[in-house]
């Protein structure tokens, strides 16, 4: 047997205390790295963006759950299915865009997409309707990014199409230009 010219290495004869110390050190490094991570951005019902006013005080986006929507739900409640904050008009104050429908209990009720801003009182107010529920569309793939609202609208080509199975699909987006939201879109599919 040939002996090594290298010195005896300590880790080749490690004791349990050595492994516990190593595990504790690794846990400390992982915990410290977790503290240095940035907050993740989300677009959920509980997410609220904030901007800064010239005085430095942050301004929260309007709360979609606190708004009154122009929906006729025939006695049922309205449901905020999705919401996302964003500064849509570039004024430094965030708006909230909400996808809302009536709580129908079953089926797929049509959606409305509304832009909310801070009202003069405590409750936010609807300042624009991007999708009117009267058009009988279902909203999916909803997002707000860099001042642009985007969604996929599912609909029906006629009253003969079963309400379970939309046969029209359109990708749309809205962007504030001048004094109004301008819509652009593209039909993706239409069954024959």
Image (cartoon, rainbow, N blue to C red):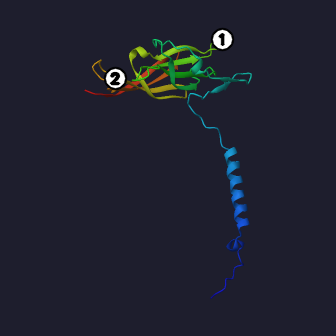
Instruction: Report whether residue 89 is seen.
Output: no
Instruction: Report whether residue 4 is seen.
Output: yes
- SS of the residue at dot 1? loop
Which residue occupies 27% across, 19% down? 160
| Residue 152 drawn above or below residue 72 | below
Q: Quadrant of residue 141?
A: top left
The quadrant the N terminus occupies is bottom right
Q: CA distance from mark 2 to mark 1?
A: 40 Å
| Residue 28 drawn above or below residue 138 | below
Image side of residue 80 versus residue 135, left or right? right
The residue pinned by badge 2 equals: 163
Image side of residue 15 versus residue 118, left or right? right
The residue pinned by badge 1 equals: 121
Q: Quadrant of residue 55?
A: top right
Query: Residue 108: image x %, image y %?
Result: 40, 23
Image depth: mark 2 or mark 1 in front: 2
Pointer 1 local density, CA inside 10 Å: few below 14, some 14–19, many at least 20: few
Which residue occupies 71% across, 70% down? 15
Q: Which dot marks residue 154?
A: none
Closer to the camera in the image, 24 or 124: 24
Image side of residue 112 versus residue 55, left or right? left
């Amino acid at each position: 047997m040939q002996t090594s010219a290298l010195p005896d290495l300590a880790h080749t004869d490690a004791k349990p205390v050595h492994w516990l110390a190593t595990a504790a050190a690794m846990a400390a490094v992982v915990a410290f790295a977790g503290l240095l991570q940035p907050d993740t951005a989300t677009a959920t019902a509980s997410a609220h963006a904030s901007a800064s006013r010239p005085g430095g005080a942050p301004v929260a986006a309007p709360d979609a759950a606190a708004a009154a929507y122009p929906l006729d739900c025939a006695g049922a409640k309205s449901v905020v299915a999705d919401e996302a904050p964003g500064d849509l008009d570039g004024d430094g104050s965030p708006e909230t865009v909400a996808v809302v429908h009536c709580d129908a209990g079953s089926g797929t009720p049509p959606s409305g997409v509304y832009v909310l801003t801070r009202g003069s009182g405590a409750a936010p107010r609807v300042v624009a309707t991007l999708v009117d529920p009267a058009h009988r569309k279902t909203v999916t793939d909803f997002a707000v990014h860099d001042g642009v609202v985007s969604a996929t609208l599912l609909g029906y080509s006629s009253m003969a199409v079963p309400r379970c199975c939309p046969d029209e699909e359109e990708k749309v987006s809205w962007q504030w230009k001048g004094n109004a939201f301008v819509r652009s879109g593209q039909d993706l599919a239409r069954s024959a």
